[in-house]
Amino acid sequence: MSARRFLQPSVLPGFGLTFGFTTFFLSAVVLIPLAALVVKAASMHWTDFLSVVLSRRALGAYRLSFGASLLAATINLGFGFLTAWTLVRYRFPGRAFIDALIDLPFALPTAVSGIALTSVFSPTGPLGRPLAQAGIQVAYTWIGVTVALTLIGLPFLVRTIQPALTEIQRDLEDAAETLGAGRLYTFRRIILPALAPALLTGFAMAFARGVGEYGSVIFISGNLPMKTEIAPLLIVIHLEEFDYAGAAALGVVMLVMSFIGLLAINLLQAWGRRRIASAR
Amino acid sequence: MSITLDQITKRYQGVPVVNDVSIDIQEGEFFVLLGSSGSGKSTLLRAIAGLTGVDHGRISLHGRDVTHVAARARGVGLVFQNYALFRHMTVADNIEFALRVRRVKALERRRRRAELLRLVALEGMDQRLPAQLSGGQQQRVAVARALAHNPEVLLLDEPFGALDAKIREELRRTIRQVQRELGITTILVTHDQDEAFALADRIGVMNLGRLLEVGRPEDLYARPATRFVATFLGAANLLLARRGTRGINFGGGPVIPRVSDGPAPGREQEVVTVLRPEEIELAADREALGCSYMDAGTVEEVLSVGALERIRVRLTGAAAAQLLSAGEERAILDVTRTRHEQRVFPVAAGQHVAIGVRRLHVLSTPLSSFTACAPDEGGARALSRQPLLVELAARMNTRVSARVEPQLGVGEPAPGGSPATCIGCAVVAARRESGRDIAWLLQGGAESVLVLPRDTPAPRRVLIHWEDEEVRRATLAASASLLRHLAAEAIYIGILPGGSTDAQRPVGMRSLLDARSEAQAVHGLDMRTELRFGEVAAELSQRLAEAPDQLLILGISGIDSLTARFALLFADPARPVLVIHQPGSGRDHHPGAQPQAAGSERHGPDRTLAGAAQTAGGPA
């Protein structure tokens, strides 16, 4: 039955060929390395494995990595939406400039962002000092980690929301208004549902990126074990101690957790899409 | 009065896109706003809905002033060209949206939904999503949704734009039916004249932000008042003609006698005539025509379009030069003939034919054509190519001819030497002595003279003033004629003498209001008014200096006053001025000056010449 679908003609030369290439490259670039990781981890005895991945230090690192990523992605949900809204809905001088600025975190070596953030938010930095005086320490705490991950994740949200927002016609809001809806009602009932898939995708991407982020975080986090040490750093530490198996074990755990998270978001999205019944 | 618009103006970056529009729409009326894209019709509709604010004017719905009321509180239903359905909601949820917002109980919502779905013939579609419906069905849902909260007014913005012809017609019928059944006051915006004819109780034609004419479809078609409406509603051949006491003739050709009983013109005038393609008769020769002979011609092209036959005939006689065809192809007359006519006298390309006119409509437009006058041929030709003039002529669908007038520009024209008769609107280059040039042309019989500086841009504002009430009518007519083709705002300036007492002020105010209401009633021209105090020329001059890109329309009753009172206005040769003069204003013209026919909404009496057939065999 699925063979028939494979044979459907399309622009690209044949399903067989494209599918073959897809699986080949996916294998070479993604699946085989990941499998190697699992194999490496499997070389450990399961008690060793558990002691590594369930160590207090490792648990602290997971909590920080996943927690801060989740928080940063959530912040970006609001922040990214506002930015995208401003860029799509208004015409102002410097708009193109700001639009280009959004992508900078993509282009910059992450270490550069990390160093920049640290210098700004350290207790002697221009933003860190007033914050410290107010009793909020940003650098070298989980707050700093979240700030770094927010910076890194922003473009994902903005860039996924932007096209979706452009597609929402002004007329929809006008229609809602003539029907008597207030702004908040229109936003809740019209704009948000239409944007939901884009918001979820952006959120998932920002979250995934946050979990794997290394360069920009290690400078601002302070790397105190169990407090401000992120999971990727813990993996690097294991590697530096030539404990390849331990590093692989942590990697597998992160892999599984990330995969579950992303799968959940994808399923949620598919469910939403089915509910909207492919609005386009 | 269900919807009343009073001098609505909306500007974008200083340019009026809706320009002083006033309409009264009756309870239960189906009103169609017709115009090409960019005419301001959609902006006006959005203003009525409350989605766009206005810069000036008032909007009332059922006597309630809603100018500053938010869209959600206006009680209007709006239907968009692209449906604007909420795609993540079912048909039921879409329709109930307005009811949910108002916290209507579920039972009542369901009842109302069923009623609306029946109205738009979509029973049983409740649980579909918009994406599962065809375009026509989606638009039906949009109509039902817009009606859910029992709005007082239904607004439709090009609702059929995205649909194909057959669905369009079906939906058109549904909408008309729904409108009748509910008796809801409706405004529909469209660029499609068929749609307007099919649906409208009344049509309002918009162009460049102005509402040019309002009337019942058949009246607008038969008796348009403006060139724009004549050509926009249906096909029309426009010809310049001279109207004298005996009738109308096209450039020295035979005279088509006037049969209607309009006021007889005091002297020969240039007019613009409208010839509908179906009112033209073709025959083998003059004697075989059943109506007044107009000219000879050669058939260029015959095109059969179903029931009708479209023929393009090249005029070969004197009338050829009078034809105001748009575009390159001059002297081509469009003719349509029924099957019956085709059988009686079949034609083929290349054939010589006699052309007759069954029915002719004369437009009451004062600026019939432009004649650029200069002392030498080069000057006249250069002036006739002045960009603003060319642009104006193109928009007004008329022509610019060049004429050498050696007496112009020599300082003081020789006294007594009378210039050749001037017809249409004369144009002269602006110079310090423009006052004298104008006087000279007016003596020659010109009724209007436009003074044009070399590089003047299109005016953004037109100031109107007349010397005394005797020229009011002529000045207003010319102003309306010009302003229909300009995206400019009109302001009438009334001026009282500097030492006016308080007792005189109400008189001044009243004359302003009179002027405004006459412009509105007779010409469909809305203008603003301003009252100033002081010496007339000085005040006008000062007002002109206040902003760039202004044009002054000045009505004068005596030629002497040009130099005696208004010399100051021509001192600055950078200013465009249109001078209107009513020759012999006073007794011989004024009484007959077209009293407003009762019942006719605006635009003066019926000047259609009809039934020319009675005089078959025709004029000498």
Image (cartoon, coloured by chain):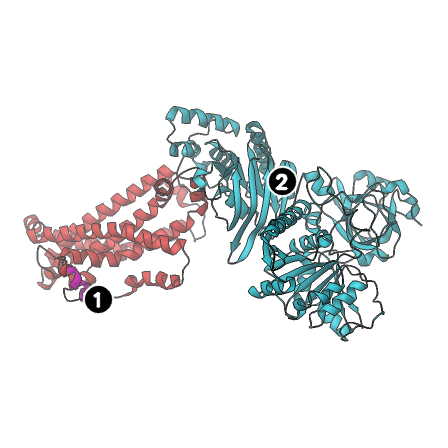
Chain colours: A red, B cyan
Residue B385 placed where, x, y %? 70, 68
Determine which quarter of the picture holds residue B449. bottom right
Q: Are marks 2 and 1 in contact (CB under 8 Å)?
A: no
Residue situated in front as seen by the camera: B63 or A4: B63
Q: Residue at x 51, y 26 (%)?
A: B118
- How many neighbours does mark 1 have within 10 angstroms: few (below 14), some (14-19), or many (20 or more)? some
Residue situated in front as seen by the camera: A144 or B549: B549
Q: Which residue is mark 1?
A: A116
**Residue B495 makes an appearance in the image:** yes
Residue B516 placed where, x, y %? 63, 49
Mark 2–mark 1 distance (CA, rounded to whole Å): 64 Å
Residue A192 placed where, x, y %? 34, 44
Identify which amino acid the numbered label 1 is placed on.
Ala
- Image quarter of the C terminus of chain A: top left
Q: Is A45 placed left or right of B200 in the picture?
A: left
Residue situated in front as seen by the camera: B451 or B581: B581
Element class at badge 1? helix
- Image quarter of the N terminus of chain A: top left
The magenta stretch spans which residues?
Answer: A113-131
Q: Which residue is mark 2?
A: B195
Determine which quarter of the picture holds residue B499. bottom right
Q: Is residue B144 above or below residue B16?
A: above
Give residue A153's mark.
Answer: none
Residue situated in front as seen by the camera: B268 or B616: B268
Q: Is residue A120 above or below residue B304?
A: below
Main secondary structure found in the magenta portion: helix
